[in-house]
Amino acid sequence: QGLVLQPNGSAYMDITPTVAAENGFIARFSQNGSLVWATYFGNVLSGVHSAAIDAEGRLLIAGRIGHEVPQPTGGQPSGTHVQPFAGGSDGFLALFDEDDDIYWTTCLGGSAADYASAARTVDERIVVVGHTFSSNFEPIEPSPGNGYNQEDYGGGSDLFITEFDLNGALVWGTFYGNQDPEYIEWGSQAVRMNTDGDLVIGAVGGVNLDIEPGPGWYF
């Protein structure tokens, strides 16, 4: 008995899972518990680790994938950051339109293993946090102004933090870690943005993290 799938109008639909491998999937239920839409997403060695709804009511998902991420039927929108699959397993980000069809997708990663663990959206911002074993992880992009920038991979595994706007354009991306392993659990709820736009992350790290005391913060 396979996963119960449910088409829904023009919503994205994939009914072809990979046998004997991990298959990502998405399922939407109504307020009364009825299955409205369900589809596989990603197939080979894929998993959906996080889901959010943006300011326009659109579904945003993040996770890991073992090959190229599914593409929008009409092609990627102009101006979006689109990164191809780089090998190993990559993180991915996918934004759907109001009808649950794919609007924009991108891989996040390098030649080793990469995992997008949590995606959050507030106002005009999309932030995805995960961890990577790839020294050549992309995208890494200096943040505007005086934002935090770690352009070089620290070793072991590092956190990555990447921000996009609601149109899929890259805003900034950074490593956060050192030679010890840093990681964040799949589907982590320990990533939040407050009303001031501050990003708060709870994860696991080594003994030599870049620590910065804040005014009035525990230290």
Image (tube, rainbow, N blue to C red):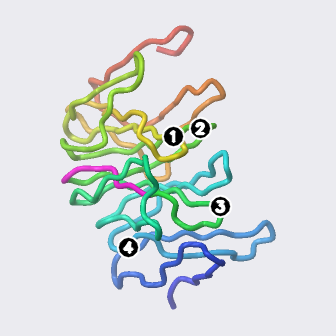
The question of residue 116 being in magenta is answered with no
Q: Nearer the viewer, residue 111 or 104?
A: 104
Q: Nearer the viewer, residue 195 or 115?
A: 195
Q: Are the residues at dot 2 and dot 3 in contact (C-beta closer than 8 Å)?
A: no
Of labels 4 and 3, earlier in sequence is 4
Which circle, 4 or 2, is nearer the viewer? 2
Residue at the outermost front position: 78
Which disc number belongs to residue 22? 4
Which circle, 4 or 3, is nearer the viewer? 3
Which residue in the protein does label 1 denote? 165
Q: Which residues are magenta?
A: 105-111
Q: Is residue 157 above or below residue 2?
A: above
Badge 1: few (under 14), some or many (20 or more) residues near its Cα, within 10 Å?
Answer: some
Q: Residue 183: which quarter of the image?
A: top left
Which residue in the protein does label 3 denote? 98
Q: Give amino acid for label 4.
A: Glu
Q: Give amino acid for label 2.
A: Glu
SS category of the residue bearing label 2: loop
Spatial CA distance of label 4 from label 2 is: 33 Å
Q: Are the residues at dot 1 and dot 3 in contact (C-beta closer than 8 Å)?
A: no
Q: Are the residues at dot 2 and dot 1 in contact (C-beta closer than 8 Å)?
A: yes
Residue 153 locus on image (x, y percent)? 21, 35
Of labels 4 and 1, earlier in sequence is 4
Which residue in the protein does label 2 denote? 124
Spatial CA distance of label 4 from label 1 is: 30 Å
Q: Give amino acid for label 3.
A: Glu
Spatial CA distance of label 2 from label 3 is: 16 Å
Q: Give amino acid for label 1.
A: Asp
Of labels 2 and 1, earlier in sequence is 2
Badge 4: few (under 14), some or many (20 or more) residues near its Cα, within 10 Å?
Answer: some
